[in-house]
Image (cartoon, grey):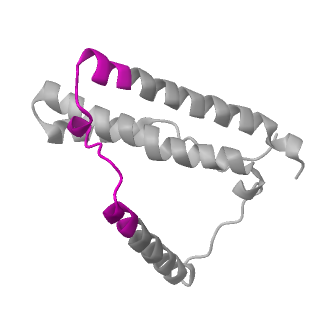
Amino acid sequence: MALDDFEPYVRGDIRSISGEWLVALILSAIAFGFERRIPGFFGLRMFGWRDLLAMACVLVAAFLFSGIASRFVRAPSFDLQLSGVPLSLRAGLVLTAGICEEFIYRGFAIEELGALAGSRWLAALISLIFSLCRTPGYTVFRPP
């Protein structure tokens, strides 16, 4: 598959990444600037060695479980593989999901809606509904 076949999707992904960072920055300005929230309000804290240890354990578990699951489930074949997407774009997608989406859907939505509604459970339910209804950022696609 030629690199030119990926161009419309790459542009769309770049717009999606840019939009999510813009939303995260606007929500950060509202939360930290206007509302004077502290990072701990959203569960944000400094990265530590325990986090690194937890990530290593989860990574090992993920490899083990994926190895076990691969014996029982056959992977679907796609016309277009993610490996054809530029590495920088894949890294951007992962960083955007890990930072922006977690802040938007878990941190901001649950904590702010919880403060407004008086119930974190209701806020979590609303956030879940919005996150399930949004269009997936990366889907299996066929080139035009």
- Report the front residue among 44 and 117: 44
- Eyeballing the image, is 110 above or below 73? above
Residue 99 horizontal side relative to residue 49, left or right: right
Q: Residue at x 65, y 36 (%)?
A: 13
Along the line of sight, the residue nearer the viewer: 111 or 42: 42
Residue 11, x across and y down, in percent: 72, 32
Q: Residue at x 43, y 70 (%)?
A: 56
132 on left or right of 66: left
Q: Residue furthest top?
A: 34
User: Residue at horizontal 69%, vertical 46%?
Assistant: 88
Q: Where the C terminus falls, by quadrant?
A: top right
**What segment carries the magenta color?**
28-54
Q: Is residue 138 visible?
A: no
Which of the two residues, 31 or 134, is positioned nearer the viewer here? 31
In magenta stretch: residue 93:
no
Q: Is residue 29 magenta?
A: yes
Q: Is residue 5 visible?
A: yes
Location of residue 15 (image quadrant): top right
Q: What is the magenta segment's predominant secondary structure?
A: helix
The vertical placement of 19 against 33, above or below, is below
Total count of labels: 0
- In the rendered structure, the answer to whether residue 80 lies left or right of residue 122 reads right
Residue 1 on image: x %, y %: 88, 53
Occupied quadrant, residue 119: top left
Q: Quadrant of residue 105?
A: top left
Name the spot of residue 43 as percent of width and height, x first. Answer: 25, 43
